[in-house]
Every structure is written in C-alpha cells, then in structure tokens.
Amino acid sequence: MKKIILTVLVLLPFCLLAQNKKALDPANQIKQFWFVLLKKGPVRNQDSLTAAKIQAGHMANINRLYEAGTLKVAGPFAEENLAQGLFIFDCASKTELETLLQTDPAIKSGRLVAEIHPWYTAPIGSFTPGKPKKS
C-alpha cells in the first residue's frame, strides 16, 4: 500500500502538469498592455494647413509604431463623446509608452492629449470557464 501511495505522490505532479500544460504556456498568460484614450488637447487653434500637416504626421507615426510592433491597435471613435480615438500599446513600462507617445505630432503639438491606462488581457481561447476565484 505504501508503494502505491508513494507512486501516486511521485506521479501526481506530472499528471497535473500535463492537464494544465495549456494554462502554463506563456503564450496563454494574462499580459499587460497600455490602453490610451486620445482626447482633444488644449491647443486646437492651428490653421487648416498646419492641422492637416499634424494629422499626416500623426498617421505616419501610427504606421511607424505599428511596424515596430509596439502599437497593436489604433483608431478613431465614430462618436466623440468619450474621446477622439484610442491606442493599445505593448510596452514594457509606462515610461517607454510616454516616450513613444511624444513622437506623435498631434500629442506633441497639444492638439491631442493621451489618457493612459494599464490594461490586461490574454489570447482568446486561453481562459478556462469556471467559477470565479474568491478574493
């Protein structure tokens, strides 16, 4: 009987590991991103030519940051009640994010301001349904 219990105790962690392999895969873990609301800034009195140049630079910067892999999602809102638009960044720190945001001509000029929020998610399909954990 002791051999059976010992065998179960030795093998149990390996069985549990095999069952939870998907949950332990780093690709399935919750990760922090940065959710940035872009709001109207205090400096919006540029003439139309200057505003168009700022917007062109804003779009070029979005494309550059996307190609670099740090900007994951960007876009305007159809309704401007909440904000002008949003960014979702994959950055190691808030300091890195703030540095990247200052490369945006619309933010740098004061035409837009960035409201930064840490945001967490995991790849779709990585969550296991079940009862929520009690805090």
Image: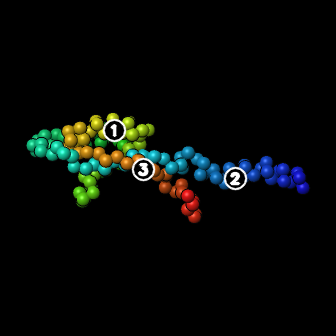
When the figure is inspected, residue 74 is found, relative to residue 91, above or below; the finding is below
Q: Which residue lies furthest to the right in this view?
A: 1
Front one among 105 and 62: 105
Mark 1 residue type = Glu
Mark 2 residue type = Leu
Q: Disc 3 designates what residue?
A: 119
Quadrant of image for the N terminus: bottom right
Residue 35 place in picture, x, y as percent: 37, 49
When the figure is inspected, residue 33 is found, relative to residue 125, above or below; the finding is above
Label 2, residues with CA under 10 Å away: few <14, some 14-19, many ≥20:
few
Mark 3 or mark 1: name the one nearer the start of the chain: 1
Task: Kindly indicate the quadrant of the structure image that contains residue 61.
Answer: top left
Residue 125 place in picture, x, y as percent: 52, 57
- Residue found at x 41% / y 47%: 118
- Residue found at x 83% / y 50%: 7
Circles 3 and 1, Cβ within 8 Å, touching? The answer is: no
Q: Disc 2 designates what residue?
A: 16
SS class, disc 3:
strand
Q: Disc 1 designates what residue?
A: 98
Q: Which of marks 3 and 2 is in front?
A: 3
